[in-house]
Amino acid sequence: MIIQLEEAIHHLEDIREEVAELGSTLHIEELERELENLEAQTSEGDFWNDAKRSAKILKEIKARKSTVEDFRKLEADVEDTITLAEMGIEEKDESICEEVLAEVERIEKEEDRIRIEVLLCGEYDHNNAIISFHPGAGGTEAQDWASMLYRMYNRWAENAGYTVKLLDWLDGDEAGLKSATILVEGNDAYGYLKSENGVHRLVRVSPFDASGRRQTSFASVEVMPELDDSVEIEINEADLEITAHRSSGAGGQHINKTDSAIRILHKPTGIVVGCQTERSQLQNKETAMRMLKAKLVEIKEREHLDRIEDIQGEKAKIEWGAQIRSYVFMPYTLVKDTRTGCETADVDGVMDGDLDAFINSYLKMNANK
């Protein structure tokens, strides 16, 4: 046991050097100075006079404070664990060994998490995320697969400490969904979830096939950053077809059963967005417009276009060959990302929201390009 404590100290000393390097990458001292300056601005007499400016500053404070506090705690945890291990060796207290080893494992995971966050440097990475789900061809089986993905991302978000809000839902014919949209609220939500944008393929014995045959189904996941009012996008009202309809679906008591639901078609691109969970038609329209703006910006950034007007709409089909990830339930279990090669046989864990390995491998791959 004493030998294990000595090995743990050597390992922690290596981690200490890695953490110091991470601090340089994060420019942690510069962040602390910026945080001090931003917090000083909140004490100015006219700070609250400009709502947009104050909201932006508060958001910047929250992001920097989170990074600084997480890093400084990691530093302190390394030193405290080294001290604990040294104490165990000095007092020949073997009972400390299990606690030290558990703490080393936790510190390694926390360092990896913070290191991954460094990769979230895109313009909208710190924003909330809007996720839309659409089944491909295949009727009930594809609609059920879309609802399984809906549950998977809800579980991931909840496990990660994010808040999930249902924005829109359209029931499937017999099971599942025809379309759904959720808002994932929390720092870096879009930065992590942008890796999930694309077509997802399922292989399983369909519960809707009386013959028990194996089937392949597809569903698309669209991920967009939620944009605040500081992002200005001009959309011509004449390009919009706005319709109101009666809310329905999985919202239960949280969805008003009135003609307050709004669906917006952007005619130049064919993009359709909708919202039905707000309390009034006006609120649903405002939310749907934010979704449309987010979708237009996401496509513009992804396609490297100069202007919103250059967007021609989505061309990718929800079918074989377009998938970013395959989920095989039979005759063996496997989830494999076609972009990074990351894979696991724990398909149940993945469907319960264990997506971090896939998300992290995507971020690392993009960082090395």
Image (spheres, grey):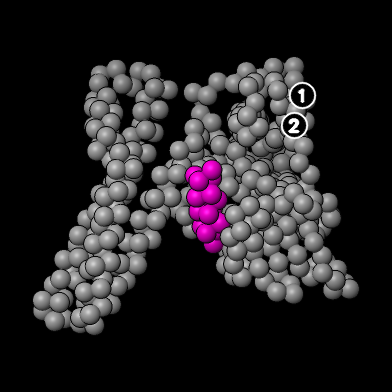
Residue 178 at x, y percent in the picture: 76, 48
Dot 1 surroundings within 10 Å: few (below 14), some, or many (20 or more)? few
Residue at 50%, 46% in the rendered image: 368
Residue 363 at x, y percent in the picture: 51, 48
Q: Are marks 2 and 1 in contact (CB under 8 Å)?
A: yes
Q: Considering the image in quadrants, where does the C terminus appear? A: top right
The image shows residue 182, relative to residue 111, as above or below, that is above
Closest to the observer: 49 or 309? 309
The three-letter amino acid code for the residue at tag 2 is Gly
Give the CA distance from mark 2 to mark 1: 8 Å
Closest to the observer: 127 or 89? 89
Residue hosting label 1: 268
* Residue at the farthest front position: 369
Q: Earlier in the sequence, mark 2 or mark 1?
A: 1
- Label 1 element class: loop
Q: Main secondary structure of the magenta part?
A: helix
The image shows residue 300, relative to residue 168, as above or below, that is above
Residue at 15%, 71% in the rendered image: 86
The three-letter amino acid code for the residue at tag 1 is Pro
Is residue 286 toward the left or the right of residue 215 in the image?
A: left
Residue 361 counted in the magenta span: yes
The image shows residue 154, relative to residue 237, as above or below, that is below
Closest to the observer: 50 or 59? 59
Q: Please tell me the numbered disc located at residue 313.
A: 2
Residue 292 at x, y percent in the picture: 65, 30
